[in-house]
Image: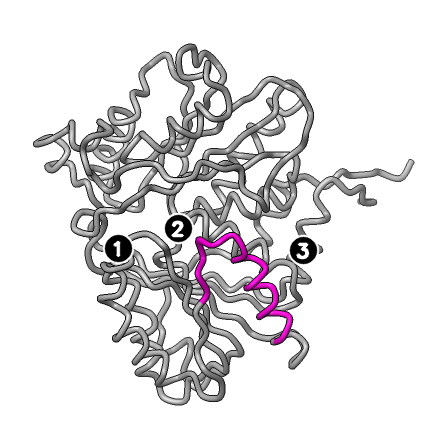
Amino acid sequence: MTPINKNEFIDILNQLPDIVALDCEREFSKKKYDVFLCTLGFEERSLTIPEKLSSIKYFSSQYSVIFEYSTNTEDNEVNKPRLSRALKKFTKFKPRKIIACDEEGFTNNLREFLNVVSHAKEKPKVLLDISVCSSKLLLSAINVLFEFNICLHIVYSEAAIYHPTYEEFQKEPEKWMTDDGFGIARGVGNVIPSPEHPGSTRENPPLVIAFTTFKPERTNAIITDIDGTILKEPGKRIIWIIGDPHMSKEDKDKRKQMQRTINQIDENSISVEVSTFDYKETIKKLNQIYKDKNLDSHIYISALGSKMQSLGIALFCYVRPDVTVYLAVPKEYNPKQYSEGCKATWEIDFGSTKKLRELLDSVGQLSII
């Protein structure tokens, strides 16, 4: 009898590219891209990669696109002159475009732009800087980019300091745990299922996979919107994803404990530690939960984790479209206590999205061994 194998998600993870250290000068010298996508934010690292690219000899991009937020506009505008100057140096042929990423028509605007680029050139090369992308923006942008046959290269600048530090939290815990405290953000804007990841319509009981943050009000708002009874009696209806940060063991242990305290995750709660840096670990853990729980539950993801966790969620949901992703935007971020500096730069070169889609589409298919 001919042996038949059913392709599993775990079987293709080693075929996905790793995140590796980025030397901008070595990687991009004499390189030409068709599109460079970046985000205007208040963090200093929003400028790191654009300014590095602007200093590289013979690097160019035909188009540059700036994503702009509706929150903290005055804070973000401080970095706009420097960002514009950097882009002007390597954007050779076409004017820079600005796309408001919080508007309802964002994905259509991005899709229309990429349509123009794709008609002008077969398989354009796209460079995406996710350094200051929100979860909402990253999930939406990746979803649209996957629709096109492009060469996708992702770059990322890692902050040197993430707030709150352990000392800051110990000094004023209420600042990070209560709705009144500012912390890294304040207030809850729209709480919505992701339009790009609505999930299935079946009536199974909800199971929430909640990626922790350092201010619990948005997570609580998402869980309440899914089912108002879950927070009162969570039982086995919430699986908390504790971010395992890209830090020294001592610092990461402190930061994981802060997440547990801020989100009131005790020994009776179900929790899993997942790297904030290795996007493939996010895929692996989400898929394991899916295999264990999907038949009995409608899985919801509260997607408020790190950039790399959000990237993992995007790839996971491409393969598992029956999962619903929930998003919540704060009314205001705290630019003084969000992050500081840039520790290192990183890259993930996905190459052809057509080949990437074929790889992801192979999950669940039968093959002859």
For badge 1, the amino acid type reads Ala
Label 3 sits on a secondary structure element that is helix
- Residue 60, compared with residue 24, is above or below; it is below
- What amino acid type is highlighted by mark number 2? Ser
Query: What residue is pinned by disc 2?
Result: 134
Tell me the tag on residue 197.
none
Q: Residue at x 22, y 27 (%)?
A: 178
Residue 296: within the magenta? no
Q: Secondary structure at mark 1?
A: loop
Residue 110 drawn in magenta:
yes
Q: Which residue occupies 38% across, 78% down?
A: 26
Q: Nearer the viewer, residue 60 or 278?
A: 60
Name the dominant secondary structure of the magenta segment: helix
User: In the current view of this chain or complex, which residue is farthest to the right?
Assistant: 1
* Image: 94 above or below 286: below
Residue 88's place in the image compared with 147, above or below, is: below
> Between marks 3 and 1, how big is the CA–CA gap?
31 Å
For residue 319, side relative to residue 369 (left or right): left
Q: What residue sits 65% from the left and 59% below the top?
A: 147
Determine crowd level at label 2: few under 14, some 14-19, many 20+ residues with C-alpha closer than 10 A.
Answer: many
Give the residue pinned by disc 1.
159
Report x, y in % for residue 267: 33, 14
**Residue 356, picture quadrant:** bottom right
Instruction: Find residue 250 and report its image quarter.
Output: top left
Find the magenta span and give its range: 99-116
- Residue at 37% in and 40% down: 189
Tag 3 near tag 1, CB within 8 Å: no
Question: In the rendered image, which residue does mark 3 sit on?
Answer: 357
- Residue 56 appears left or right of 113: left
